[in-house]
Structure formats: structure tokens, C-alpha cells
Image (cartoon, rainbow, N blue to C red):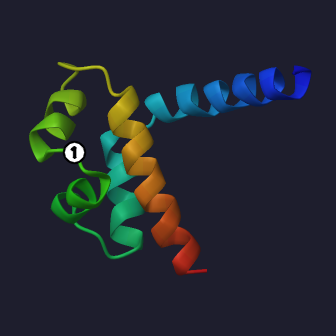
Amino acid sequence: MLIIFAHQIIQNAIIMSLVNTTYEEIKQRAENVGLSIAKLCREADISESTVQRWRVGATDPLRTVRAIDDVLRRYEAANE
């Protein structure tokens, strides 16, 4: 039980650091693996307008960032 709790704390800390990820950092990571923002959004199953609202601070980015990070990690792992 303690291990699960510790894992959740670490996971939450990682997610919170991702929330502070800027749009430009995400765009750069996507470009590094050959993805456009449009394709990244399709792969992450989110709309481009969601990313734009997050970019300008009009929405909470947590779900968006998780989905984007999952896709980018898959592509980055494939490029290693």
C-alpha cells in the first residue's frame, strides 16, 4: 500500500511538471519526432482548439498535457 501511495505521489509530481511545460516545448518535441501539432492532437485524441485554449490559458491543461506527453513518449521511444 505504501509503495502504491509513493508511486502516486511521484506520478503526480511528474504530471505537475508537465503542466508547466510550455506550448513551445511541446511543439519542439513534436517537431523532433516529425509530428505536426495537428497530427499530435489527432494521436492524443484532443482537438487543436483545446491546445489553443490551453496555450492562451483559457482551459486547464492537465488532461491535454497527459495525452500529448503519452503520444510524444511513444514517438520518442520509437526514435531511440
Q: Is residue 41 visible?
A: yes
Confirm whether residue 20 shows in the render.
no
| Quadrant in which the N terminus is drawn | top right
Q: In this rendering, would 79 be left or right of 56?
A: right
* Residue 14 % position (x, y): 63, 33
Q: Quadrant of residue 50?
A: top left
Residue 10 in the image: above or below residue 77: above
Question: Which amino acid type corresponds to the residue marked 1 in the rendered image?
Answer: Ile
In this view, the residue in front, 56 or 13, is 13
Q: Is residue 3 above or below residue 65?
A: above
Mark 1 is surrounded, within 10 Å at the Cα level, by few (under 14), some (14 to 19) or many (20 or more) other residues, namely some
Q: Is residue 7 left or right of residue 22?
A: right
Q: Which residue: 21% across, 45% down?
A: 46
Q: Residue furthest right?
A: 2
Q: Element under label 1?
A: loop
Q: Residue at x 50, y 35 (%)?
A: 18
For image coordinates 33% across by 68% down, the residue present is 31
Pick out the residue farthest to the bottom.
79
> Taking 13 as reference, is 77 above or below it?
below
